[in-house]
Amino acid sequence: MRPLSQPGKNRQRSRYVLLVITLLTLTIITLDARGVPFVSSARNDSRDVLVPARSASRWVTTPFRNAWNGITGYEKLRQENEQLRQQLGAETANSMKEKNAQEELAKLKEQLNISFLGGTQSQVARVTAGAASNFDDYRVEIDKGSELGLAVGNPVVTKGGLVGRIARVTKKRSVVQLITDPDFSVGVTVGPDQNQGVGHGTGSTRTFIVDRGIDLTDAVSTKDSVFAGGIENSIMPPDLFIPIGTVDKITPDEAARVQVLQVNYTVEFGRLDVVQVIKWVPTS
Amino acid sequence: MNAESTLALRWSLLLVMAYLLQVGFLQDFRPLGVHPEIMLLMAICGGIVGGSSRGAIVGFFAGMLSDLLLSGTLGVSALCFALVGFAAGVLEDSVIRSSRVISIAIATVGSAVGVLMYASLSQLLGAHSLSDPQLWLIITIVSVTNGILCLAALPLCRWAEGFGLNSRAY
């Protein structure tokens, strides 16, 4: 058992230790904030080294996590099961009525393909972990990295539309900055007239805001589709129209002489699992 | 192997185990959507068991491991955890007679201070953590869960410090 109070020499040593550690951490913070490559690469390499240990740990604890999720999400699971059973019953009845199984299959296949990607090179990835921090940092980790050609800036999509872009990449993993991040700004094309503006996340998984570039005279209406891309020198590919959502509410801002659009996302951020990374990087 | 090396080895082993527990299980164990911060708890228990300098050192390494998981600036958790670990050691030293209740109180208050400090520092560096609408919920849940978990963590930290699992050092 250690002594209840430390002698003066030990206290001096403690203060010295604290001073050294504080200076060390402040140095690391400064170097990382200024984007010094050595710090970033050391961090990325350390993350890669820890990947097998993290995967093994998650594999070992799967039964416990499942048990916990079962306990806390029992009611939700029961409701979802009930809903799915009803849907399944309705679908089965419809199929039997139409007797057109081939056509149903073709429709399903069409749903699985991401139509807006065209022939663009992409990589399928799976979301391995959600936010590691208690504070919402609007980031998720995916299980593919630079060894498969992914790079910082690559857009990430699902068949629902734009999910975000790669913010950090290591050999085996990447971190995706979600479009819901208030710091995520992107050029958008709105409606059949292809009006161009700039929007950003709001922190919510439901609403995206377009608050620049759509003039008061521009023809925009609710239910219009909002796409990322189609704009030169954007952070999204100029030749692709990636859905973000549909306009829910339009508010004119007389002071700024623009229309502010409230957009509902087409992607369900609560259910992110498999995503596609478009192998395209912005020019600047 | 000398005593210092054994001490370092034991603490390293404990920190790695805590890290694996955090990423493997606790990250998904989210009462009201908030998970416990066991690495912060390690720093506090290090301070309680081994004194202020041990708390600072353990906090630094625990924080660096945590920072590898997070997407924020590297070193923020390390700084916060080191300061909280140090403060926990100072607090524990300032009491005349250690008791389990005091250790739990230090773990609970230390966790609250650690989370608040992390949020403030992250906000200064451009994150939105201090303005997070769930800030007070996060502080409450982390404090309460760490207060409970410290009952299990303290014996392990005592082992790492070389006192033995059954020592009565709180």
Image (tube, coloured by chain):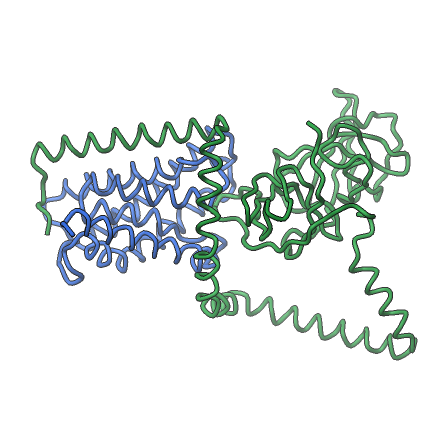
Chain colours: A green, B blue
The residue at the point 31 percent across, 49 percent down is B41
The residue at the point 88 percent across, 75 percent down is A101
Q: Nearer the viewer, residue B81 or A122?
A: A122
Residue B160 occupies which quadrant of the picture?
A: bottom left
The residue at the point 92 percent across, 75 percent down is A98
For the image shown, how many numbered marks are present on the structure?
A: 0
The residue at the point 76 percent across, 74 percent down is A88
Horizontal placement of B89 versus B75: left or right? left
Above/below status of A68 relative to A220: below
Residue A184 occupies which quadrant of the picture?
A: top right
Query: Residue B10 location, x and y as percent?
Result: 24, 54
Query: Residue B122 location, x and y as percent?
Result: 45, 34
Query: Residue A155 location, x and y as percent?
Result: 69, 42
Residue B100 occupies which quadrant of the picture?
A: bottom left
Q: Nearer the viewer, residue B108 or B41?
A: B41
Above/below status of A38 relative to A222: above
Q: Nearer the viewer, residue B101 or A23?
A: A23
Horizontal placement of A55 versus B95: left or right? right
Query: Residue B117 location, x and y as percent?
Result: 38, 36
Q: Quadrant of the C terminus of chain A?
A: top right
